[in-house]
Image: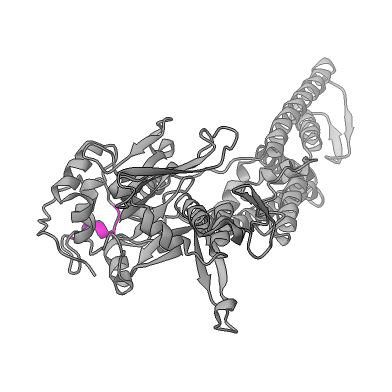
């Protein structure tokens, strides 16, 4: 439920109309279910207008006023019954896809190859000269070359079209990662495409921001916005008066943990607007570039040799004007200037046709298509065609074994606790430590991690022992949390009870610079009043 603390007046300035997309959720002037429209939200989500966006956000009461307008509870999230309304009102988190290219377009573009152009010109000339010289058999050579060119074009078009369809299917799911949200008071893990305006999304260091949002609460939050703004330095995010609270889609959280209120998804997000204007141009593979260069070189050499032969033949004619030459091609005596020119031109064209290997483009196309299909059978979809050539030259592959050679599931099997070594597979924390020490260890693990555990019961049984534990977040932290549960402690309840960012607790997330994660807890106890406790994880050699 949503508690109305104060009356919020939604009076937004009119945003600049910088889009011509139709139909669009931006065209709605009023909303039947929410206190703010997508067009009004655009006024606090303008590109490059951070100060103006912040002023407009403060005018509606900050994140709390915006959450009230979006019918979102900052602690319980959105209601499950609002999902369809939110999708219709603000759109879904699907990124715009470029217009599909037809197989006819691929067929026409395949004739841009330099080798094919040379072959087509040579074939036409050879066909014309052959028909003129020998109407019965002179068309064979030119027609054969044109047929070879047609086969190359058809195979190339079919391969490119098939690859394009596969890539479009891949692009639809490649960025569809899992994110953590809270809906109806329950913390869930959903896909990026399911994120809606009004969702409360939880982010940790290393996470990619799935949509545009406003920071609700967080600690030590820094975001790398170089993909959108080009700024190499990480941007600090905060909830104070002059802090930048705007989380931009497509950027990466480099430090800290936080929760944010989603304000724009899909094509209406910052990254969605940019992506709608992008158009990827196909590029040749390194082998194709080398073949184009070689074809040009062969063409130049062939044309030079043909020109030299033509000049030499004509020179002989002019030096011996009365000379008669037997010509098998023309089937008659060559004794005129025109017939001498035609005879010399046929020889020159023949040299060019022989010099350019008409089977080379077909061989390359078939080999690339074959390698792509072969790797697809091994569940390797080639996103870049040059990868076939690159992997063909690879002799050693270096890969992270976690998640590749293993199942990416970890378990604590041994440890030292207060000087006591334990390697019990069922209860790593030794019971002889005492309840106070066990409680401190459990508190340290619970508040000094960002992962959480989700239990899903088996379909065959509903007993507690059949529940399958799924780790949401870092797998190493998940192993530590399961260790805490082995001593009958609930790490999520401990974290919610002890850690309160709004009351001064601090979380310094793990980073490659610090090599550790640190959490500062203000102990809210009558006996230990005004005292603090620091939990640290990692970098034992530094601590």
Q: Quadrant of residue 375?
A: bottom right
Q: Residue at x 19, y 60 (%)?
A: 69
The percent coordinates of residue 314 (x first, y second) are 78, 22
Farthest top residue in view:
319
Q: Residue at x 32, y 50 (%)?
A: 527
* Nearest to the observer: residue 461 or residue 95: 461
Q: Is 201 placed above or below 57 here?
A: below
* Residue 262 horizontal side relative to residue 256, left or right: left
* Nearest to the observer: residue 326 or residue 199: 199
Q: Is 522 placed above or below 85 here?
A: above
Is residue 231 visible to us here?
yes
Is residue 175 visible to us here?
no
* Nearest to the observer: residue 140 or residue 413: 413
Q: Residue at x 60, y 61 (%)?
A: 431
* Image quarter of the N terminus: bottom left
* Nearest to the observer: residue 20 or residue 85: 85
* Residue 301 horizontal side relative to residue 257, left or right: right
In the image, which residues are magenta?
21-28
Q: Is 456 placed above or below 110 here?
A: below
* Image quarter of the C terminus: top right
- The colour scheme of the drawn protein is one colour
Q: Is 517 placed above or below 181 here?
A: above
């Amino acid at each position: 439920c949503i508690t109305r603390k104060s009356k919020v007046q939604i009076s937004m300035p009119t945003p600049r109309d910088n889009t011509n997309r139709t139909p669009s959720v931006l065209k709605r002037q009023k909303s039947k279910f929410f206190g703010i429209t997508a067009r009004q939200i655009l006024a606090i989500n303008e590109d490059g207008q951070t100060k103006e966006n912040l002023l407009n956000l403060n005018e509606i009461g900050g994140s709390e006023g915006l959450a009230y307008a979006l019918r979102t509870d900052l602690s319980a999230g959105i209601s499950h019954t609002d999902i369809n309304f939110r999708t219709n009102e603000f759109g879904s988190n699907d990124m715009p896809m470029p217009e599909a290219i037809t197989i006819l377009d691929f067929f026409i573009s395949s004739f841009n190859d330099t080798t094919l152009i040379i072959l087509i010109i040579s074939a036409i000339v050879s066909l014309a000269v052959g028909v003129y010289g020998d109407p019965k058999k002179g068309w064979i050579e030119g027609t054969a070359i044109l047929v070879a060119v047609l086969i190359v074009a058809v195979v190339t078009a079919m391969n490119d079209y098939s690859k394009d369809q596969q890539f479009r299917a891949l692009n639809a799911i490649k960025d569809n990662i899992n994110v953590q949200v809270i809906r109806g008071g329950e913390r869930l893990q959903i896909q990026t495409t399911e994120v809606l305006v009004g969702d409360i999304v939880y982010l940790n260091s290393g996470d990619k921001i799935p949509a545009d949002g406003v920071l609700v609460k967080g600690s030590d939050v820094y975001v790398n916005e170089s993909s959108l703004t080009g700024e190499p330095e990480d941007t600090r995010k905060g909830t104070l008066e002059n802090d930048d609270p705007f989380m931009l889609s497509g950027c990466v959280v480099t430090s800290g943990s936080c929760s944010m209120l989603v304000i724009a998804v899909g094509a209406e997000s910052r990254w969605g607007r940019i992506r709608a204007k992008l158009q990827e141009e196909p590029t040749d593979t390194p082998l194709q570039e080398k073949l184009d260069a070689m074809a040009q070189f062969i063409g130049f050499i062939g044309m030079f040799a043909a020109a030299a032969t033509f000049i030499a033949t004509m020179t002989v004619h002019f030096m011996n004007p009365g000379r008669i030459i037997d010509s098998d091609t023309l089937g008659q005596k060559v004794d005129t200037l025109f017939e001498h020119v035609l005879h010399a031109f046929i020889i020159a064209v023949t040299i060019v046709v022989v010099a350019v290997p008409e089977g080379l483009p077909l061989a390359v196309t078939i080999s690339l298509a074959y390698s792509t299909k072969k790797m697809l059978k091994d569940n390797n979809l080639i996103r870049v065609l040059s990868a076939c050539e690159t992997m063909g030259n690879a002799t050693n592959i270096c890969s992270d074994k976690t998640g590749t050679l293993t199942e990416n599931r970890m378990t604590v099997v041994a440890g030292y606790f207060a000087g006591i070594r334990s390697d019990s597979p069922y209860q790593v924390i030794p019971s002889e430590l005492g309840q106070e020490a066990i409680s401190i260890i459990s508190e340290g693990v619970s508040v000094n991690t960002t992962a959480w555990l989700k239990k899903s019961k088996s379909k065959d049984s509903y007993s507690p022992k059949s529940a399958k534990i799924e780790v949401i977040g870092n797998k190493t932290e998940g192993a530590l949390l399961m260790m805490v549960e082995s001593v009958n402690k609930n790490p999520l309840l401990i974290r919610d009870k002890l850690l309160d960012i709004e009351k001064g607790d601090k979380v310094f997330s793990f980073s490659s610079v610090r090599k550790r994660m640190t959490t500062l807890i203000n102990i809210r106890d009558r006996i230990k009043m005004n005292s603090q406790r620091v939990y640290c994880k990692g970098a034992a050699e530094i601590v």
